[in-house]
Image (spheres, rainbow, N blue to C red):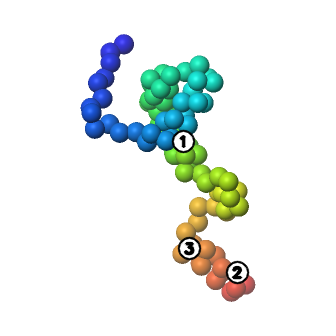
């Protein structure tokens, strides 16, 4: 396996890394293993990136976070059109 040297301007969020480290230790993994696994998964299934991003952006710990993914992906314009079409009937 060849190694890729990451430049000195490759920055990661320290708080996130520290939180992830606790989980990684429980799974008996290290950061290098996780990153390699992550990149292999993206190469084999590029759509997984959207799933991961959606999960990472999901809010937790509040009432509005419980609604994530429940309301839908409609835009305000689409909601207005749907509401006006219901009024016409």
**Residue in view at x 56 percent, y 73 percent:** 76
Q: Residues within 10 Å of mark 3 (few under 14, many from 20)?
A: few
Discs 1/3, front:
1
Residue at point 45%, 39% (across, down): 14
User: Which residue is the site of mark 3?
Assistant: 76
Instruction: Tell me which numbered mark, 2 or 3, is placed earlier along the sequence.
Output: 3
Q: Nearest to the eye among marks 2 and 1: give it.
A: 1
Measured in 3D between alpha carbons, the distance from the residue under mark 1 to the one under mark 3, in whole angstroms, is 25 Å
Q: Left or right of 46: which side holds 82? A: right
Q: Which residue is mark 1?
A: 52
Residue 86 x %, y %: 70, 80
Q: Is residue 58 positioned above or below 49 on the image?
A: below
Q: Position of residue 52 (x, y in %)?
A: 54, 42
* Foreground of the two, 36 or 78: 36
Image height of 78 relative to 39, above or below: below
Q: Which mark is residue 86?
A: 2
Q: Secondary structure at mark 2?
A: helix
Residue 88 quadrant: bottom right
Q: Residues within 10 Å of mark 1 (few under 14, many from 20)?
A: few
Q: CA distance from mark 2 to mark 1?
A: 36 Å
Residue in the image at 55% along x and 51% along y: 57
Marks 1,3: beta carbons within 8 A:
no
Q: Is residue 69 visible?
A: no
**Residue at x-position 52% and y-position 46%:** 53
**Quarter containing the C terminus:** bottom right
Q: CA distance from mark 2 to mark 3?
A: 15 Å
């Amino acid at each position: 396996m060849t190694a890729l040297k990451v430049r000195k301007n490759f920055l990661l969020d320290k708080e996130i890394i520290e939180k992830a480290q606790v989980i990684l230790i429980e799974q008996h993994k290290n950061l290098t293993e996780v990153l390699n696994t992550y990149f292999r998964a993206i190469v084999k299934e590029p759509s997984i990136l959207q799933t991961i991003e959606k999960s990472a952006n999901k809010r937790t710990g509040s009432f509005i976070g419980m609604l994530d993914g429940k309301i839908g992906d409609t835009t305000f314009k689409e909601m207005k059109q749907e509401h006006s079409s219901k009024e016409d009937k």
